[in-house]
Image (cartoon, rainbow, N blue to C red):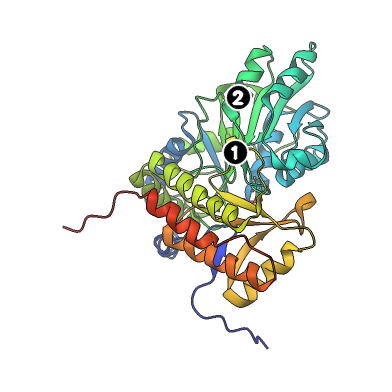
């Protein structure tokens, strides 16, 4: 028997899946059509060109009916061979999981990073990547793999700096980037930053449910795929890219999630990508203002790389973040992100991505503040009031009713 009867909508304030807008939910409820029929092909072509704008690329974007983990595997399997040496940078839980995947696939990842827990509070250090690549005079390293927005910590690394480091070392390694939680929330430029494979997912900035994921692919990555020897069948790019030319896929695609993607592209491109990024920056700043007013620490220790997608809130010594989260869930019907891996129990994560607005952010901060107080955490002041003041003093143009 369920003895928990929450009133109203659940507040899904984890950093993905993000809340799915009603407009997308309605689009998903359209009848599933023939994925070989003319209507589908027309939609396929529209989606494939729309998604290129989001990645800021003119090159192919492969869409898989899989979670982000599948697209991680696709990026590695299409470009590398068994035993290949790759350089990965420890920024948190997701960087660690990608490294473990590389090991399972028979690749040899070298995991570099800042010592101890520091890596989990800072971004990718391009200077360390450059130094390592300069030392690799034989060019054994075939790829550099980094996470753009580390969802476990709330850190958005500087990918342009990583590209500059690879160029400065005159190293031929491919650049593979995970922006599963960054895309369509934080500025991202596949072509301009010279990224070879960008990996992303549906359930974060794109506001879809989980279930589709992406590889944006450069010419150099396509070339590498011709000689890469890791086994691949389902993940193989070539056949998909070929069939995508007419708007179709070689297998049965996830039609109803593609309806939602079609709708999401319209929402995001009508708002304008720059406006979307600015909205996320502003809400992220308001959230951090609240955390600072509470007198609590932000997980990201470097203001240069604060994430516009989520904020990690560090608990004072002796407070278990999972106990606070559970209390908030039970009392206020709100989910906050758990601390993952090395951060388990030490912090929780507030997601402010996708459809988040001033008022939805204020609701989540109110829930967090009430929960922290109920859990006995001593707060220096009201984060809710501080965030409201921030939003008031950083106003956006008001909606004009004719
Ligand atoms: N990489 C990052 C940065 C993520 O945030 C996630 C999921 O949250 C993943 C990879 C794994 O993606 P998925 O859970 O969709 O397989």
Q: Which residue in the rendered view is the most extreme toward the left?
A: 402
First in residue order: circle 1 vs circle 2: 2
Q: Is residue 398 left or right of residue 308?
A: left
Q: Residues within 10 Å of mark 1 (few under 14, many from 20)?
A: few
Badge 1 element? helix
Q: What x and y, as percent, mark residue 299?
A: 67, 48
The residue depicted at 71 percent of the width and 58 percent of the height is: 315
- Between disc 1 and disc 2, the foreground one is 1
Badge 2 element? helix
Q: What x and y, as percent, mark residue 61?
A: 52, 36
Q: Is residue 233 visible?
A: no
Task: Say if disc 1 is inside 8 Å of ligand 1.
Answer: no
Q: Where does the C terminus fall, quadrant-wise?
A: bottom left
Q: Is residue 324 visible?
A: yes
Residue placed under numbered mark 2 in the picture = 161
Q: Is residue 359 above or below residue 137?
A: below
Q: What x and y, as percent, mark residue 69?
A: 68, 47
Q: Which mark is residue 18?
A: none
Residue placed under numbered mark 1 in the picture = 303
């Amino acid at each position: 028997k369920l003895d928990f009867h929450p009133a109203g909508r659940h507040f899904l304030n984890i950093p993905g899946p993000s809340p799915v807008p009603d407009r997308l939910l309605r689009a998903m409820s359209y009848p599933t059509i023939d994925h070989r029929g003319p209507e589908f092909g027309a939609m396929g072509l529209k989606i494939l060109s729309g998604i290129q704008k989001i990645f800021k690329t003119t090159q192919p974007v492969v869409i898989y009916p899989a979670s982000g983990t599948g697209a991680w595997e696709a990026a590695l399997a299409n470009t590398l061979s068994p035993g290949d040496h790759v350089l990965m940078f420890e920024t948190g839980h997701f960087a660690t999981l990608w490294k473990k995947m590389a090991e399972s696939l028979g690749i040899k990842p070298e995991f570099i990073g800042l010592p101890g827990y520091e890596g989990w509070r800072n971004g990718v250090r391009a200077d360390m990547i450059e130094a390592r690549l300069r030392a690799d005079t034989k060019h054994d390293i075939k790829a550099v793999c980094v996470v753009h927005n580390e969802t476990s910590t709330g850190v958005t690394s500087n990918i342009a700096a990583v590209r500059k480091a690879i160029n400065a070392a005159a190293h031929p390694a491919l650049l593979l980037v995970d922006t599963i939680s960054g895309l369509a929330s934080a500025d991202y430029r596949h072509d301009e930053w010279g990224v070879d494979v960008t990996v992303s997912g549906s359930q974060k900035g794109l506001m879809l449910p989980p279930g589709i994921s992406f590889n944006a692919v450069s010419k150099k990555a396509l070339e590498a795929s011709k000689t890469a020897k890791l086994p691949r069948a389902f993940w193989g790019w070539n056949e998909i890219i070929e069939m995508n030319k007419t708007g179709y896929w070689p297998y049965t695609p996830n039609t109803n999630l593609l309806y939602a993607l079609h709708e999401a592209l319209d929402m995001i491109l009508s708002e304008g990508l720059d406006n979307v990024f600015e909205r996320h920056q502003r809400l992220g700043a308001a959230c951090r203002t609240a955390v600072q007013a509470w007198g609590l620490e932000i997980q990201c220790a470097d203001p240069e790389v604060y994430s516009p997608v989520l904020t990690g809130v560090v608990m004072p010594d002796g407070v278990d973040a999972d106990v606070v989260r559970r209390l908030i869930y039970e009392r206020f019907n709100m989910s906050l992100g758990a601390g993952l891996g090395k951060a388990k129990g030490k912090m929780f994560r507030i997601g402010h991505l996708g459809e988040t607005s001033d008022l939805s952010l204020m609701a989540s901060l109110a829930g967090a503040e009430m929960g922290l107080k109920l859990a006995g955490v001593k707060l220096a002041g009201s984060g809710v009031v501080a965030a409201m003041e921030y939003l008031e003093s950083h106003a956006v143009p008001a909606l004009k009713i004719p």
